[in-house]
Image (cartoon, helix red, strand yellow):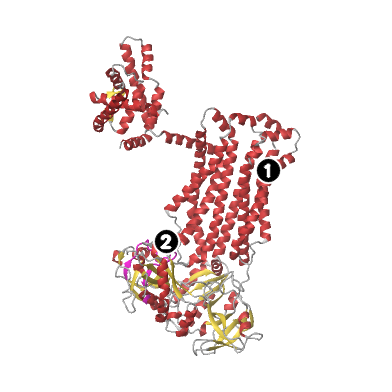
Amino acid sequence: MDFLRTLLSRIIELFARPHHDHNLDDEIAAHLDLLIQQYVASGMSQGDARTAALRDFGSVAQARETYRVQRGFPHLEQFARDLRYAARQLRRSPGFTLTAVLTLALGLGANIAVFSLLNCILLRPLPVPNAQELAVIRTDRNDDERGPNYSFGSPFLRSLEQHHDGFESIAGYSTHPFQVRNEATNVRVPGALVSGQFFQLLQTPPLLGRWLTTRDDREGQARVAVISDGYWKARFHRDPAVIGQTLTIANKPFTVVGVMPSSFVGADPMYRPEIYVPVWAEPIIDAPYNAIVSGYHSWWMRVIGRRAPGVSLDKANAALGSLSDPILDESIPDAKWIKDARAHHFRFAAEPGSRGYSYMRDTFRKPLVVVFVLCSAMLLLACLNLASLLMARAAARERELATRLAMGASRLRLIQQLLVESLLIAVLGTAAGLMAAPAVSRFLAAVLIGGNGDYVSLDTSLDLRVLVFVAGVAVISTLLVGLVPALRATSKSLNEQIKSGSNSVHARQHHLLPRLLMGLQVGLALILVFGAGLLATSLQRLHSIDVGFQPKGLVNLSLEMNKQSRDGDVLVAWYHQYIDALSRLPGVKAVAYVSYPPISGSTWTEDMHTTISKGDQEIYMNSVSPGYFSTLKIPLLAGRDFQWSDNATSGLKAVLSVRAAQKLFPGQNAVGQSVIQSGAGDSKKVYQVIAVVGDIHYSSLRNEAPPEGYFCIMQNTDHKPNYVAVTRVEGSVVPLAAAARQLASRMAPEVPAPVLTPMTTDIDRSIASERIMAMLAVFFAICALLVTAIGLYGTLAYSTARRTSEIGIRMALGAKPAQVVGLVFRENVWVAVYGSLGGLVVAWFAARALTSLLYSTSARDPWVLIASVIVLGLIASAASLVPAIRAARIDPSTALRAE
Amino acid sequence: MGDNKSDVLQGTLDLMVLKTLEAMSPLHGYGIARRIEQVSGDAVVLNQGTIYPALLRLEQRGWIKSEWGTSETNRRARFYSLSRIGRKKIAEETENWERIAATMARFLAPSN
């Protein structure tokens, strides 16, 4: 109690000190007055009385000091004094301060940014209670080279819902944009189809109303929906009467029964649905498609489970595995399929799912880890650099420190003071890094997601715990880094110091540690530059691939016609009218339809054969309109393009790519011949080949051009197909976007506004992970070069400054400026050479790790290696030349007089 | 710095101050110092300056309180008096001190 009260009173005093100093002085004055009066009364003269009073009182100064110590926090005050002193010191050498703070900020900022991205993609659990009980369900087969399968059809889900041994609940979900009526038109809203146990499994209570239950997820039940907090706010302005209101989704009314809190993100941490509806409504939502009717042919859901209390993942996994056979029998009505599945050890399996399932995690795991390693190397480099800078600075201050030691400062106090200086740098650097980090990670996230319209959300905010941890580590490591130079600088006595002076002969051995640090930096920088060079080269090669068409100037305009009323020939006529109108817009050079634009991520394949092909061939397919090949500038090698008059009655027509023609008609001319589409049962269709066109990269940049066939949209028998109008534009896309939307809303007001994406964006997005890796690697490499240059320059400048008089003597004795330049320059040359050699050796072995990430680039590409060494050598030379030249300009007489 | 050496002394000084204030208060620093010297029959000669840190310590603990007033020489001075906690503490501290004194006395008594 007494202790607490004392503490409290001291804290209060902290803020009131000046006033109270005055108070004590008053008290002492009054005291002395009374004492003097007492002695005067006893007959002393005024002067004697005063002397006697002062004697009785004792030392006023000591009383004051003891009082002050008792009153406040002497250590704190001393610390504040040290801090002010350190701030003054740093302000006096702004170059050093800026370098040190920037170095640290760069290293830390990049690290925090990348880490927060890693955290949100790879590490952070779903924000639901007891996330550690969640499991992601998958299926394994021993013949699937793509690895485990995370997609499920509805029959499996329904069986799993029934038998969930080891699991408290199992749920399936599928996320994609829904078409929701908003006034006269439909808009796309991120949505999720969720099975009955979904909400129960995620255990987050609704904000309003109720969540969906197993009772809602039965065919023929009332159409109900749960909405997100964000949608409640945006659409209903947080009206509590939202429960019971109707939303028109895919042209059918759904009743809102609940609102989820804003913390709820569903089961995919990177996709935030705004609307949740039961799985049974899939045929309504996805009309005219129906994945439920397609049964086991359609794999469209992810499945997650929550383990029953006390059941380990291993046990749950085993229970699930033993269910595989009964579930196969129960859910698949195809004996051949079951037999095939059994032969390949088809089984269900559970894996840890606390973080939910996200395709992004699989896609970006490796690149992010690579980036994180680069980042850590960068931080290490920054620390090394800081250490050598501090060391050089402390070395330059050795005399000052030795003098202060000789004058009675304790070594502990001096070290304390130096550490406070490091602390200040650490805090400033960390703060700058922390401030820059969110912007950097937002930028990275934007590059990662690549463009708009995906409804992907990345929450890159960093948890407070991580933040505090990072800041703590940074500050502590800086203090440790600062401790070595502080200890070294204060270790010498003044005597030694003055004897050795600034023309120290021992300077060389004294400099072993800083040189080692610099060498390490050079080596690390070389590794970073080499890695960045490899990744950039690989990206450059990816970019310069000839894709078979000209993506520049193409804009994909995707239309969603699946929820409006036109179909068949009427819809084809509408599509035709629409591009006719589009092609008349200013700036539009050509326009045509396609089902799946190349490199957009979607493809479709069919088995085809001819009389001379060796059985069925897998051909990549697309549906296109007349003018597609000329719009994309795909060369028409033989035959004719489709015409609008090719329709349902005119006989089926097909166009083949060169590779497809070679596969289906080996050694023959394909034009005019027939290909047969090997459909299920007897629904064979025979197409007449009317042309052969050039090969293009259909599925991705990395993969070679596949054999491709084209049908025409006029002969497509699907209901209400969606097409993308590929438009070749000259000039800005902006006026086209507005005009195309206006046109669509005039011709079909109920259709959602078309989404525009430049083809180059699609291509960039398809190599987002390569792009981000290369970009970051280059960024880090540049930072590394900068930091190394600064380090080399800084340490050399300091050590040269200390050798001023030595150089002066040399010059007085006849050394030529060139010799002096050589002398100083040589100091760094060895550091650079040894560092580079070390770096080369490590890079040679470490580059292996990059092999799988590189495109047609060897991990030991000699050109990249040579270029890295040259770049580093140039930078190091430039950084070392400046102090060397400055040394050569030293005027011998001034230098000697200065001593 | 010498904290340990003066601990015992500090303790005695604190108790002397408390007892003084119990007998007569409010009193300023000079008055307290004078009174301690008088009561001790001038056996205790204080460096009177040391009384101020002691007063501060006691006030920080909340055992005494102070008010500004005017001294006999018409100067601004602080007048100290016991607080409620201080009154309770005196008994405790007295007992404490007596125990120590008795123990010491036993040690110092000629052994027989």
Magenta: predominant secondary structure element?
Answer: loop
Q: Quadrant of residue A821?
A: top right
**Horizontal and vertical percent for residue A759?**
55, 70
| Left or right of A615 in this view: A215 | left
Pick the front one: A580 or A512: A512
**Horizontal and vertical percent for residue A162?**
35, 75
Q: Is residue A265 magenta?
A: yes
Q: Check disc 2 and report the residue beneath it.
A: A125
N-terminal-most mark, 1 or 2 = 2
Pick the front one: A3 or A428: A3
Extreme residue in the front direction? B112
**Horizontal and vertical percent for residue B66?**
28, 28
**Horizontal and vertical percent for residue A314?**
42, 67
Q: Is residue A177 magenta?
A: no
Q: Quadrant of residue A512?
A: top right
| Left or right of A206 in this view: A483 | right
Disc 1 to disc 2, C-alpha distance:
52 Å
Q: For the residue marked with disc 1, what is the amino acid?
A: Glu
SS class, disc 2: loop
The chain letter under disc 2 is: A
Q: Check disc 1 and report the residue beneath it.
A: A827
Q: Residues within 10 Å of mark 2 (few under 14, many from 20)?
A: some
Q: Residue at x 42, y 52 (%)?
A: A464
Tell me the magenta residue range. Answer: A256-280
